[in-house]
Amino acid sequence: MIHLWLPLMLVCILAGAGAYGVIARRNAVLVLIGVELILNSANLLFVTMGSVRGDTLRTGSVLTLFLITIAAAEIGVALAVILALFRKRGHIDLSEPGA
Amino acid sequence: MTTLDVIFGAVGLITAASAVLAVSTHQLVHAALWLVVTLGTLAGCYLILGAELVALVQLLIYVGAVVVLVLFALMLTRAPMGPSPEHSSSSVQRIAAAVVGGGTTVLLAAVLVPALGGEVLPTKAGDTTAIATQLFGTWVWPFELLSVLLLVALIAALAVSRMPTTSPESADVPPESADTSPASAEKVSP
């Protein structure tokens, strides 16, 4: 028996921390860490709701697996873009104007 | 308060604290290491909520692959090892980010907790067999589409990292440095 406000509060805190990381960070890799935290809060919401409303399609767990796959693809492409940016500019500071 | 409430509270507290540390620490490598703690304890949360398969996949892909990719990217972009105050943002930007982050938390909590917070999650055994049946039955076409997505992402990462650069500062960099990025991009394929 778990009271549902506990996982829901964790979802809210993870999303808030991710939003803070996306805006406050200047390093592009650290911005990606914020994006990962937001995606993980969505995952936790999927799992929690899937456990509460146990439907026959198991939508919560299956969509979480899909979202993890999409996040892996996203971070692969994003890091390739960041490395290309680093080779072109010599730094990945997002607060400085582009060349 | 039940026993699972207490366990979830403890694990969730570690998750929330390490998530806040991951976005607020001034050492770049420490941020990636706090992300490991966050994702690992989040897998524990999934386990407590009764989703064993998701917890294992989270450990495999996030802690195993994504964090390694992030650490690789930090090393390849020559991140400083010690505290780096020159990389920290201005106080105005941090205050604005704190307002947005806190607002996100409060708004989500104001919507989710009154709507669903009173419900109680029944403890049940994990149904991995049912998930597998549904995943390769009902959801098989989205699943196949996702494998195509992974392939496209892999090829795109290769193409982006092999893109010729025209800036003068990269002209003197030998092509060996270009060979390191496809190697890190390939790690996502399994």
Image: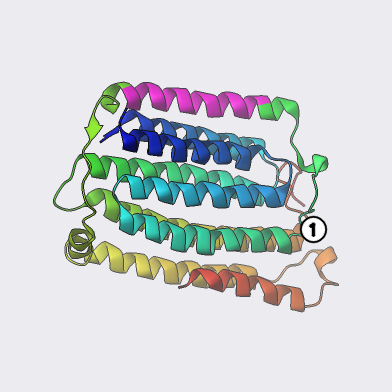
Q: Position of residue A71 (x, y in %)?
A: 46, 56
Query: Where is A44 relative to B29, above or below?
Result: above
Q: Residue B100 colored magenta?
A: yes
Residue placed at 65% from the left, 47% from the top? B31
Q: Residue furthest left?
A: A56
Query: Where is A30 relative to B106, above or below?
Result: below
Q: Residue B56 colored magenta?
A: no
Dominant SS type (magenta): helix
Q: Position of residue A27 (x, y in %)?
A: 70, 47
Q: Give the quarter of the figure containing the N terminus of chain B.
A: top left
Q: Is residue B131 left or right of residue B149?
A: left
Residue placed at 45% from the left, 59% from the top? B59
Badge 1 element: loop
Residue placed at 23% from the left, 28% from the top? B119
Q: Is residue A38 left or right of residue B145?
A: right
Chain letter of the residue carrying label 1:
A
Q: Position of residue B165 (x, y in %)?
A: 73, 68
Q: Position of residue B151 (x, y in %)?
A: 43, 72
What residue is disc 1 on?
A: A90
Residue placed at 39% from the left, 38% from the top? B8
Q: Nearer the viewer, residue B150 or A69?
A: A69
Q: Which residues are magenta?
A: B95-113
Q: Which amino acid type corresponds to the residue marked 1 in the rendered image?
A: Gly
